[in-house]
Amino acid sequence: MPKYRILSMDGGPSGPAYARFLRVIEENRPGFLARADLFAGTSDGATFTGCFGQVPRKDRNLDVIKSAIEFNNLLFKAMAPSLGGRLVMFSGLTTAFSYRDVLAAFREKFGHRTLRDLRDEDSHVVIVSFRMKQPWGPKIMHNFGDAGDDDLDLTLVDAAFRSGAFPSTMRRDPRAADPRVPGRRDHLRQ
C-alpha cells in the first residue's frame, strides 16, 4: 500500500506555531509540503489548510508557507479590537469586533474558490467544525468522495469561518441575529 501523507494542524495559537515549524522543516527538507497528500485542520489550522490546499502540489514550497504565515499575521491584526471594542466586549453587550476586516482578508486570500476547486488542483482537504443543530457533533467538511457531496461547493472562506470561533467572537452583520443566541446562529447551522 502506498504512503498517504496527512498534514494536520490544530487551531488556536498552535496553528501559527506549526506553520513556523513547517517553515524550518521546509528550509531543511525542501519538498516536504509538496509531498503532503491531504491537509486537515480546525479553526486557525483550517486557515492554514486553505492556504496550503489552494496551491497546486508542484508549487507548494517555502514561499507558500511564508505567505500563509504573513496571512495569519494579517488576520490577527484584523481581529485586534479597538479600545471601544474591548469596552463593549467586557460589558457583555455584544462581541468585541466586527467581521468586516477579517472577511475582507479571507476573501482577498481565497477569493471564491470552493473545495471542489481544490480537488481539481489535486489537493485534498478536511476542515472540521461543530454542528449546532441536532444531532450535535462534529461537522467534517472535505473535498473528496462522492461528487454529489454538498461540501464541494462550499467556499474556503465559509469553511474557515465555520471552523473557527468567528461566529461567537464577531458580529457577522449588524442586521444579522445576535450571534450569542444559539438558536439564532443561522450561519453555524451547517
Image (spheres, rainbow, N blue to C red):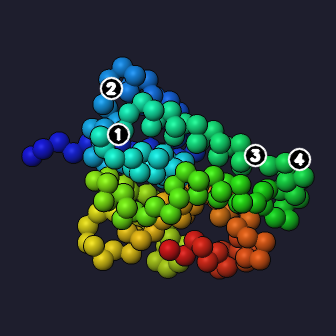
Q: Position of residue 183 (x, y in %)?
A: 65, 79
Q: Position of residue 6 (x, y in %)?
A: 30, 45
Q: CA distance from mark 1 to mark 3?
A: 32 Å
Closer to the chain start, of discs 2 and 4, is: 2
Closer to the chain start, of discs 1 and 2, is: 2
- Say which element carries label 3: loop
Q: In the rendered structure, which amino acid carries the disc numbered 1? A: Asp
Q: Which residue is mark 3?
A: 80
In percent of the image, x 51 and y 55: which residue is there? 110
Nearer mark to the viewer, of 2 and 4:
2
* Residue 102 tag number: none
Q: Which image quadrant is residue 182 in?
A: bottom right
Rendered view: 178 above or below 71: below
Q: Which residue is mark 4?
A: 83
Q: In the rendered structure, which amino acid carries the disc numbered 4? A: Leu
In percent of the image, x 78 and y 72: which residue is there? 174
Q: In the rendered structure, which amino acid carries the disc numbered 3? A: Ala
Nearer mark to the viewer, of 1 and 3:
1
Nearer mark to the viewer, of 1 and 4:
1
Closer to the chain start, of discs 1 and 4, is: 1
Q: Which residue is mark 2?
A: 30
* Residue 59 tag number: 1
Q: Which image quadrant is residue 188 in?
A: bottom right
Closer to the chain start, of discs 1 and 3, is: 1
Q: Is residue 90 visible?
A: no
Rendered view: 123 above or below 188: above
- Say which element carries label 1: helix
Q: Nearer the viewer, residue 119 or 177?
A: 119
